[in-house]
Amino acid sequence: MSQNKFRNRFPSIPIFFLLIFILSLGIYLYFRTSLLSKSNYQEIKPLATHSNGQNYVGSEACKECHADIYKTHLETTHYQSSSLAGPTSVKGSFKEGKNLYRLNDSIQFKMLLEDSGIYQEAWNTNAQEKISRSKIDVVIGSGTKGQSYLSWDDDKLYQLQVSYFNPTDSWTNSPGIPMELMEQGRPANAKCLECHTTFAKNTALYGMGNSYDKSQIIYGIDCERCHGPSRKHVTFHKNNPEMSEARFVVSHDTLSQLQRLDACALCHSGVRMDIQPAFLFLTGDKLTDYSLPDSNVKDLKEVDVHGNQYDLLRASKCFKETERMDCTSCHNPHKSERGNVLSFNKKCMECHSMNSVFCNVDSSLSNQKNTNCIACHMPLVPSKSMFMQIGQDSLKVPVKVRTHLIDIYAQSSSETTDAKM
């Protein structure tokens, strides 16, 4: 009887081991698949971190999926609005005789390109003594109109005395620095950098000074300035390439007119009164929660063309008569369109068709301006706040900026400022 019981139980022994084997194989395959999945997972290293915890990864991370947009955006003045200093990014001349700027009777600046970097030297010409020597570390401005230069002193950034002015292709006194007085370095505060970089981590008290974390600065106005910190977006789509719908990123198609305008007004609405520190505002936020306008749009004579395109546009009849118009109605932020008359004319004619609008300007003037809508209706206007002085004995020259007050102006053979209101 006991022998039969043993025989009945014996076949269950290999079945028991078989079950153990199958279970072990299942556990092995599960963990192997999990490890392979983790090894294929792509995590993007952040370049900087916003105060809300979101991470920036830089426009280079966008290139894989948006190669064409990435390539054309590199040519825009927005992207070129700041950069590290180098022989190609600094536009001024370093040739002997052309690398000088005379501030007054006793002080002259020399701009020097050396193996170790680019330098600004101040000399006392009477005593033939060097007063100071500062390295140019950061370039501010694309060079379309000019450039200013910043220098690091430990973790603090200062604007240097000498700038570059494109219209005369020469060195000049930096805007905002008193003429004929030598400046040891003007602090480059966060509000200045906010309009020339995508992000700069300010380490000063309340985020209002000129101290920065050098490792957390993203130069130029790049993709994430308009679409928000995008590490989560890039990471998700790298690991889910089959997903065509954009996730975890600001899409301008989903924004209201005011939100789209606020994204540009941050830097294009003139002087603003700060409520919160720089670099907190993100596209989609309400700008008046961060700063308030310091101008009255009803008094157009007080609105300067430099930096306040927003108020001038809002005062335009074109803007008032549409519910959807914003900056991107005419500007493509992904491409450099400067000087492309046909492109801008086409955008004008989308609303002002030849059947509904008759241009009664004198034909000779129309031909002279190459039928350029912008030259007549948005002329270049001298700024009231931005001046350049090329040399010691030269007059202050106002920088001309294209007005965004779209109007019918008194016609002349040159760009004019007289509007028929």
Image (cartoon, grey):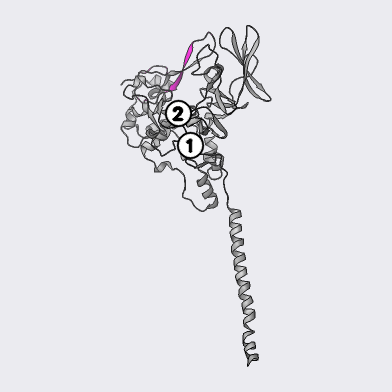
User: Residue 53 placed where, x, y %?
Assistant: 49, 42
Q: Residue 23 vs residue 326: left or right?
A: right
Q: Is residue 337 visible?
A: no
Residue displayed at 30% across by 32% down: 321
User: Residue 319 placed where, x, y %?
Assistant: 34, 31
User: Residue 374 placed where, x, y %?
Assistant: 41, 26
Check residue 399 for magenta coloring: yes
The amino acid type of the residue labelled 1 equals: Arg
Check residue 282 for magenta coloring: no
Q: Residues within 10 Å of mark 2 (few under 14, many from 20)?
A: some
Q: Circle 1 sits on which residue?
A: 225
Residue displayed at 32% across by 20% down: 420
Instruction: Relative to 55, say whether 384 is above or below.
Output: above
> Residue placed farthest to the right in the image?
115
Q: Circle 2 sits on which residue?
A: 341
Residue displayed at 57% across by 27% down: 138
Q: Quadrant of residue 48?
A: top right
Q: Is mark 2 on a helix, strand or loop?
A: helix
User: Residue 141 placed where, x, y %?
Assistant: 52, 26
Instruction: Relative to 402, say whether 217 is above or below.
Output: below
What stretch of residues is rendered in magenta? 391-414
Viewer-proximal residue, 252 or 2?
Answer: 2
Q: Characterize the magenta stretch by its predominant secondary structure.
A: loop
Q: In which quarter of the image is residue 86?
A: top right
